[in-house]
Image: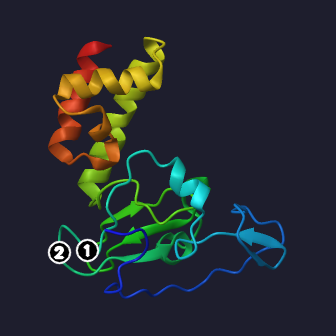
C-alpha cells in the first residue's frame, strides 16, 4: 500500500486550536506562529526514521467498521500521556485504537481493544524491567526476545502483538529476571 491515507476512509476531525507556543512543532505548514506536520502532511524525515512501518488500517479488525484518524482532544478530551504527536487511528464504533508515529501517518502497530492495550502495556513493563535489571542494550534485548518468541527481529514490536503474544512475551521476561 502506498504511503498516505486510503481514499475509502471517512475522516472526521475537529482541528484543535493552535497556540503560539506549539508543543507539536515538527516543521511543515506555518500556522499561527507554529510549523506543523499532520498525518495528512507527514514529515518525510519522520517517515524515513520508522524502520518497520505497519500497514495503515482502513477497517477495524474487531468490528469491521471504518477506521479514522482522530486527535487526542476528540477522543480523550485532552492531550493524552504528554504525547509529542496527538494523532491516532480510532474506531468510533468499538473504541479500538493505535497511536501514530510522531510526524507521520504510520501506525505504531495494529489496532487494539482495551484487553490488548492492557496486555501490551503489561508485557512492555516486564520487558523494560529485564532491560534495566540486566543493563541490556534495547536492540539486543529485542533480538533476544524475538529469538525466544520464535519470530523475526523485524516483527518484534509490542504494538504488533496480540494478547496471546503479549502473554508469551511477559512470561518469558518474568522468567528471565
In front: 141, or 96?
Answer: 141
Q: Is residue 41 visible?
A: yes
Q: Which residue is mark 2?
A: 63
Which of the 4 quarters of the picture holds residue 64? bottom left
Gap between marks 1 and 2 measured at Cα: 7 Å
Query: Do the CB atoms of the residues marked 1 and 2 lie less than 8 Å apart?
Result: yes
In front: 126, or 153?
Answer: 153
Which of the 4 quarters of the picture holds residue 93? bottom left
- Residue 47: x and y in percent read 52, 57
**Above or below 146: residue 60:** below
Is 145 displayed left or right of 5 in the figure? left
Q: Which residue is mark 1?
A: 94
The quadrant of the picture occupied by the N terminus is bottom left
Circle 1 or circle 2, nearest the eye:
2
- Residue 14: x and y in percent read 56, 86
- Residue 30: x and y in percent read 78, 76
Q: Residue at x 17, y 74 (%)?
A: 63
Q: Residue at x 53, y 69 (%)?
A: 72
Amino acid at each position: 500500500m502506498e504511503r498516505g491515507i486510503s481514499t475509502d476512509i471517512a475522516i472526521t476531525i475537529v482541528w484543535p486550536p493552535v497556540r503560539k507556543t506549539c508543543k507539536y512543532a515538527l516543521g511543515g505548514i506555518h500556522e499561527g506562529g507554529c510549523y506543523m506536520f499532520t498525518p495528512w502532511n507527514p514529515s518525510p524525515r519522520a517517515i524515513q526514521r520508522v524502520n518497520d512501518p505497519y500497514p495503515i488500517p482502513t477497517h477495524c479488525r474487531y468490528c469491521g467498521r471504518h477506521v479514522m484518524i482522530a486527535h487526542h482532544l476528540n477522543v480523550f478530551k485532552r492531550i493524552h500521556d504528554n504525547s509529542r504527536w496527538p494523532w491516532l487511528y480510532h474506531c468510533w464504533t468499538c473504541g479500538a485504537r493505535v497511536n501514530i508515529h510522531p510526524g507521520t501517518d504510520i501506525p505504531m502497530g495494529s489496532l487494539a481493544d482495551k484487553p490488548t492495550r492492557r496486555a501490551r502495556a503489561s508485557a512492555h513493563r516486564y520487558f523494560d524491567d529485564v532491560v534495566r535489571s540486566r543493563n541490556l542494550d534495547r536492540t539486543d534485548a529485542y533480538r533476544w526476545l524475538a529469538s525466544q518468541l520464535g519470530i523475526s527481529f523485524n516483527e518484534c514490536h509490542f504494538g504488533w502483538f496480540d494478547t496471546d503474544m503479549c502473554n508469551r512475551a511477559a512470561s518469558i521476561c518474568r522468567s528471565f529476571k
